[in-house]
Image (cartoon, rainbow, N blue to C red):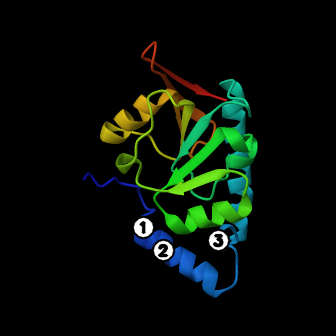
Amino acid sequence: MKKYNFGPYSKEHLDARWEEAMSSNRPWRLSIKIEKIQHWMERIKQHHSILRHLNITPDTKVMSAGCAIGHLAPYFNFDNYLGIDIYKPAIEYAKTMYPSHQFLSEDMTQISYPDNTFEWIICAGFKPEGEMFEHLNAWGHNIVSFSYTPANEYMAWNKQTKKILRGLA
């Protein structure tokens, strides 16, 4: 089984951050330093702008791959959204914040869905490559990837046309 590089956010780093937040009775989201919260909120607004720019509406059937604490969930109708992340504490937090939405704590390479189950696969914070891309490409008609720096830059892949669209929203 291939191990993926998640940059500075290793499972160990996230576990330590989670334990620190829980020991101080602060919600995980608030374990981020105050000056960073404003940046986080601005990035979420920019990600919503990307979704609107690509005509991804709240009624669109989506999988949010690597959804973390589910920050994109409120944009979507609960019956059209599935958030998946390998990091269980973040998923548990997402379930408490957005109890009507569906979340799974799974390794995406170890599960399967029928082809074209989702209209869009959203990868916030990472670019899917290799085996990960193959899995996601089978499950969705389109894949969009955007990062946090810069937060308004995206790359979208359409399975039918095999075209990549890069842009700013």
Question: In this view of the protein, which residue sits in the foreground, 16 or 64?
Answer: 64
Which residue is rendered at x = 45% and y = 56% of the image? 106
Number of numbered discs on residues: 3
Q: CA distance from mark 2 to mark 3?
A: 11 Å
Q: Which mark is residue 28?
A: 3
**Which image quarter is the C terminus in?**
top right
Q: Looking at numbered disc 3 in the image, what kind of residue is underneath it?
A: Trp
> Residue 151 location in percent, x, y?
62, 42
Q: Looking at numbered disc 1 in the image, what kind of residue is underneath it?
A: Lys
Q: Which mark is residue 11?
A: 1
- Counting other residues with Cα less than 10 Å from the Cα at mark 2, is it few (<14), some (14-19), or many (20 or more)? some
- Counting other residues with Cα less than 10 Å from the Cα at mark 1, is it few (<14), some (14-19), or many (20 or more)? few
> Residue 155 location in percent, x, y?
51, 29
The answer to whether mark 2 and mark 1 are in CB contact below 8 A is yes
- Counting other residues with Cα less than 10 Å from the Cα at mark 3, is it few (<14), some (14-19), or many (20 or more)? some
**131 w.r.t. 52: above or below:** below
Question: In this view of the protein, which residue sits in the foreground, 66 or 106?
Answer: 106
**104 w.r.t. 62: above or below:** below
> Residue 129 location in percent, x, y?
35, 38
**23 w.r.t. 40: above or below:** below
> Residue 147 location in percent, x, y?
54, 43
Q: Residue furthest bottom?
A: 23
Q: Quadrant of residue 115?
A: top left
Q: Looking at numbered disc 2 in the image, what kind of residue is underneath it?
A: Asp
